[in-house]
Amino acid sequence: MINVLAGSETDAALIARAVGNGARIVADAAQFTNGDDPVECLILGCRHPILAKTIGLLRDIERKRLWTPLILVTDRQPEAVSRLSDVKTSAVVWFADLQTELPLEIEAARGSVPLLRLAEQAGEATLPPSLRTALPYSLRAVTDLPVRSVKELAAAVSYSPITLSKAFSNWRDGRTTLSRYLEALVILRASQLRSSGMNWKSVSARLGFARETLQRKSKRWPGCTLVQLEKAPPDRLLAALVEQFLQPPQPGDPKAG
């Protein structure tokens, strides 16, 4: 899903047409950043002059949505370039070039986000059909709200929990479980939210888990308290998660206990 927010209905429709399938026009900033479904990309359309509240929204997204590509669509004006000089976005597209440039920038932005790259790779890997569907979904969901349980994942991808769990366990040669993988994704997102400046109370509310529950999950993976987790960069945690849960198992790797 690609969320589209613009200053007018006309601009939103223009952007949505350029995006094609998967575009969802939203009405306000809250819907823009907090969709109910996994969001692969955010596209914000704003005409010159760029307002202070728009800059504030961009900074908020930069802080809270580390792994979600953000593309800004605006007018080709020198003042706009200057206004955006210290704001981090995946790309800036001019309204005049919308139809030709936006689809290209969306693909480039997706490729720049590790979780979305992993999702694409999982969808193309030699895996059982259930995992080729479930793994990409779970990885994309982490950019917003990670999947909370095997049951929730099964409902989202229309496979039974037993089918998914068995397929994952067989793929991992019994060395870990789907439930532990999903718990690790929750902790990965919790780490990213905490590093963005949110306190643990806000992180817990955002993810829907009590702090005590997050603490237990963190002790299972990566094996530390939440206080210790704060010192681990999210990108390093992601690399550890990939190594433990997504890379092909090697001879001698321990079985799940």
Image (cartoon, rainbow, N blue to C red):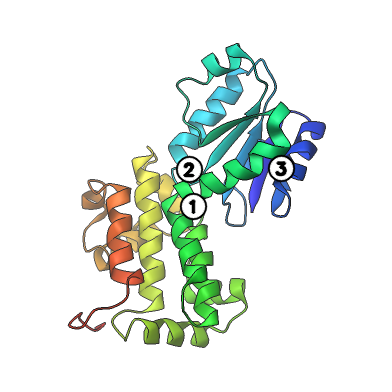
Q: Secondary structure at mark 1?
A: loop
**Is residue 27 visible from the viewing direction of this image?**
no
Return the residue nearer the eye: 233 or 201: 233
Residue 201: image x %, image y %? 39, 47
Return the residue nearer the eye: 220 or 52: 52
Looking at the picture, which amino acid does disc 2 mark? Arg
Looking at the picture, which amino acid does disc 3 mark? Val
Check the image and report above or below for 154 versus 219.
below
- Looking at marks 1 and 2 on the same chain, the residue that comes earlier in the sequence is marked by 2
Q: Quadrant of residue 73?
A: top right
Residue appearing at x 47%, y 68% in the figure: 122
- Looking at marks 3 and 2 on the same chain, the residue that comes earlier in the sequence is marked by 3
Return the residue nearer the eye: 226 or 196: 196
Seen in the image, is 186 located left or right of residue 253? Answer: right
Residue appearing at x 28%, y 69% in the figure: 244
Which residue is tagged 3? Answer: 26
Q: In this view, which residue lies farthest toward the right?
A: 10
Residue appearing at x 59%, y 45% in the figure: 106
The span from disc 1 to disc 2 (Cα, nearest Å) is 7 Å
Residue 114: image x %, image y %? 41, 53
Residues at discs 1 and 2 in contact (Cβ within 8 Å): yes
Which residue is tagged 1? Answer: 143
Residue 5: image x %, image y %? 68, 37
Residue 82: image x %, image y %? 52, 14
Q: Quadrant of residue 78?
A: top right
Seen in the image, is 26 located left or right of residue 150? Answer: right
Seen in the image, is 158 located left or right of residue 217? Answer: right
